[in-house]
Image (spheres, rainbow, N blue to C red):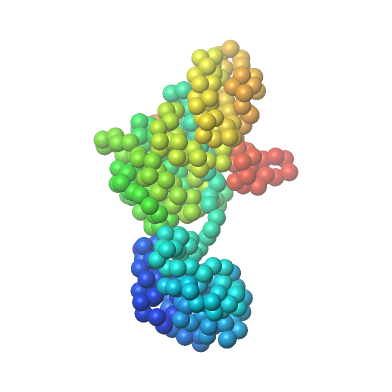
């Protein structure tokens, strides 16, 4: 459970011990701690600063008569909704909802968790898939996440391919302490975003979830949903390195993506293979963009390849000097911010809306 300071915690306003026990239990289920006010005077001091206020039915009338300032994110909680006056008091204090605690347990857990984590927004999620094996999807995924982190974007790099060898090798993080997928495959339900980020390997400003070199096991769809949900609530950008085969976990990941980048080498057979992958992706995500990796032995142009795939051309990966050697040495691709790969990543991030673009069309 994440600790938080008074004033940043959700506030429970009640003197009813039974109701308070229920609210504390629900807060614990969400990984949060509540501040408590047992009277209107105490509540007034914390009223404005709390991210969420849960007003017990026992004190709703007292707060209504005390003329509290209107604010968002106020919920009246009760064990019975039969009292007509309760609804009138709720209107007076500006409550958004009046709920029966037992009947709204799951909803309350989510609202409390959202408030404790400090945000209702979700990160932009980008999937990267290879049109064939060895296309360079993992390299592009890592470079996108690293480039975003260099620009101050809170970034999360998630390895969704159990057979990919572990994306931490691409970013040189195999010796960094933290949890890997085998420790998370049993996850289900809502996961605390802050706790997840603290538990995973961190490389500078980049958080990474990868596979280790142990036995391979598939990710259940419920675990992908739980982990990815926490990752999206905990930052600004999630980059997914995804396999070409669409199991249930991959389909779950695709459903969260704002855009998917299909990396296709500029070769005739690779284009044929990429077309099949694009067709399978299209049943799960609407925005698929082609990234064409050169050079082309036959001189194929990136736009011609994108047209053949019936996809929008997102960018062309020009040959990166010493890239293979850098990857062998565990040097992070695009980490220095220069070179063709870093430049293309900045343009991609601007085009998708993760970072601003300058007047010349490059990422600011």
- Look at the picture and state if 279 lies above or below 112: above
Task: Give me the residue at 44% from left, 24% from top.
Answer: 134
Of residues 82 and 254, the one drawn nearer to the viewer in this rendering: 82
Of residues 35 and 169, the one drawn nearer to the viewer in this rendering: 35
- Look at the picture and state if 40 lies above or below 267: below
Q: Quadrant of residue 19?
A: bottom left
The percent coordinates of residue 75 (x first, y second) are 51, 70
Task: Give me the residue at 54% from left, 35% from top.
Answer: 285
Q: Quadrant of residue 20?
A: bottom left
Of residues 181 and 85, the one drawn nearer to the viewer in this rendering: 85
Task: Give me the residue at 51% from left, 34% from top.
Answer: 284
Task: Give me the residue at 33% from left, 36% from top.
Answer: 218
- Look at the picture and state if 129 lies above or below 307: below
Total numbered labels:
0
Residue sticking out furthest to the top: 298
The percent coordinates of residue 337 (x first, y second) are 55, 41
The percent coordinates of residue 268 (x first, y second) are 54, 14
Q: Is residue 333 visible to us here?
A: no
């Amino acid at each position: 459970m994440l600790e938080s300071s008074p004033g940043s915690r959700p506030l429970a306003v009640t003197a009813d011990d039974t109701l308070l026990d229920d609210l504390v239990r629900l807060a614990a289920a969400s990984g949060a701690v509540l501040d408590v006010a047992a009277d209107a005077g105490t509540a007034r001091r914390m009223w404005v600063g709390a991210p969420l206020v849960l007003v017990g039915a026992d004190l709703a009338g007292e707060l209504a008569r005390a003329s509290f300032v209107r604010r968002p994110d106020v919920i009246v909680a009760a064990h019975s909704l039969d009292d007509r006056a309760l609804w009138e008091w709720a209107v007076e204090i500006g409550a958004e909802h009046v709920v029966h605690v037992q009947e709204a347990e799951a909803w309350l857990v989510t609202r409390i968790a959202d408030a404790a984590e400090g945000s209702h927004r979700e990160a932009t999620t980008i999937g990267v898939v290879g049109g064939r094996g060895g296309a360079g999807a993992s390299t592009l995924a890592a470079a996108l996440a690293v480039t975003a982190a260099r620009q101050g974007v809170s970034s999360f790099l998630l390895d969704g391919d159990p057979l990919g060898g572990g994306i931490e090798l691409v970013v040189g993080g195999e010796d960094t302490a933290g949890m890997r997928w085998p420790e998370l495959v049993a996850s289900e339900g809502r996961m605390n975003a802050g706790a997840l980020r603290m538990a995973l390997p961190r490389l500078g400003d980049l958080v990474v979830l990868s596979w280790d070199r142990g036995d391979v096991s598939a990710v259940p769809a419920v675990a992908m949903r739980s982990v990815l949900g926490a990752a999206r609530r905990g930052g600004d950008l999630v980059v997914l390195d995804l396999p070409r085969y669409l199991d249930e976990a991959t389909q779950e990941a695709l459903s969260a993506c704002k855009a998917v980048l299909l990396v296709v080498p500029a070769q005739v057979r690779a284009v044929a293979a990429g077309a099949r992958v694009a067709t399978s992706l299209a049943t799960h995500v609407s925005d698929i963009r082609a990234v064409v990796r050169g050079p082309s032995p036959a001189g194929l142009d990136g736009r011609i390849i994108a047209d053949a795939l019936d996809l929008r051309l997102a960018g062309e990966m020009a040959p990166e000097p010493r890239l293979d050697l850098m990857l062998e040495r565990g040097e992070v691709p695009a980490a220095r911010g220069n070179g063709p790969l870093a430049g293309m990543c900045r343009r991609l991030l601007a085009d998708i809306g993760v970072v601003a673009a300058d007047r010349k069309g490059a990422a600011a």
